[in-house]
Amino acid sequence: MIKLKKRWEISESEVTPESLYRQRREFIKAASTIGGAMLLNAWPAANASYRVGDYRKGVISLDDEITGEEDVTAYNNFYEFGTGKEDPRENSKRFMTDDWTVVVSGACEKPGTYGLEDLIKPSELEERIYRLRCVEAWSMVIPWVGVPLGSILRELQPTSAARYVAFKTLHDPVRMPGQQRAVLHWPYREGLTIAEAMHPLTLLSVGMYGKTMPNQNGAPVRLVVPWKYGFKSIKSIVGIEFTEVQPLTSWNMSIPREYGFYSNVNPEVDHPRWSQKRERRIGEIFKRDTLMFNGYEEEVAGLYDDLDLSVNF
Ligand code: MTE
């Protein structure tokens, strides 16, 4: 059993004086009924298939300051919309995500095609403030809104044959013009072991900063695995498959020597072309030390007791 520290479990009501908390909830309720919901759902425009409304505000005692929303939504990696850091925001402006569905397949009792709101119940949304550490040695701190992936996977009833979970991004070179160039093996694919996928920190996210997920950050639904390098956090997911064998992943297919299946943040294992010991937090001038498992060692180290992390990078 993985015992999580209290910091992931406290709800806002437990730390905010009750009167204040209630006032806020009442305000949110009123706002959503009188059309003031736009306050919370201000972005992106009318095309989103999933809207973040009310959600349980998570309280996490990260000492780290939250990165500015402007940085998080303007400095992106999303090769389906170009390989430059500013490309995704620019090139995803007209990306329509309405009527989004996710195909669930493989070793589970409830395969099928799910509408997003059936898979991720809006009433179950919560906020999680996590560090995101890119393999390129920069990092951010982002307030995500989502649902623990494990709670969704359990509903789908994986069978005993399910040892891994594979994820796939939409493949549509018209809507995702970056896919017209063979910079990666499209569609973008990622995967986790079933234990990683079920871990309470792993989030399926539909929003950030209290709003619906911006296109450039992976609308309408993406994975967030905070102890792994950012490329494991696959965006714009259309497929979830329970598999018996370790699934193929796009970066590993492209450059297996540089990008392993696990890709846990590890300052002791350098990328073949650069050190992973330090990182640049976006918005800061001086580099800071990279933490083992991106600072989530206490929660996740137990997943890897039987693995040599220098070989299984
Ligand atoms: N998912 C898809 N489909 N395509 C991508 O190019 N880039 C990954 C990951 N998910 C990527 C993706 C990388 S390298 C990182 S660091 C994070 O998304 C960046 O997430 P952000 O742009 O929201 O910060």
Image: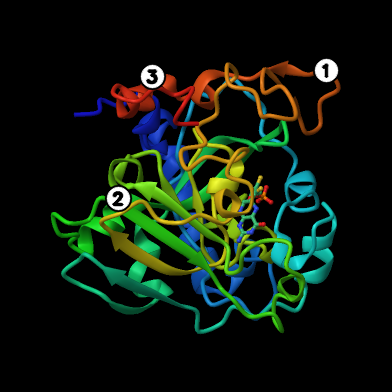
Inspect the image, locate mark 2, and give the three-letter code of the amino acid beneath it.
Gly
Q: Earlier in the sequence, mark 2 or mark 3?
A: 2
Depth order, front residue of 4/193:
193
Q: What residue is at 15 percent from the left and 59 percent from the top?
A: 159
How far apart, in angstroms, are the residues tagged by discs 2 and 3? 19 Å
Three-letter amino acid code at disc 3? Glu
Contact, mark 1 vs mark 3 (Cβ under 8 Å): no
User: Can you tell which quarter of the image residue 234 is in?
Assistant: bottom right
Residue 17, placed above or below residue 23: above
Q: How has the structure been colored for display?
A: rainbow
- Does the residue tagged 3 have its C-beta within 8 Å of any atom of ligand 1? no
305 vs 189, left or right, is left
Q: Pointer 3: what residue?
A: 298
User: In the image, which disc is placed on residue 286?
Assistant: 1
In the image, 56: left or right of 209?
Answer: left
Q: Amino acid at mark 1?
A: Phe
Residue pushed farthest front? Answer: 257
**Label 2 beta carbon less than 8 Å to ligand 1:** no
Q: Is residue 271 above or below residue 153?
A: above
Q: Secondary structure at mark 3?
A: helix
Mark 1 and mark 3: span between their CA atoms? Answer: 26 Å
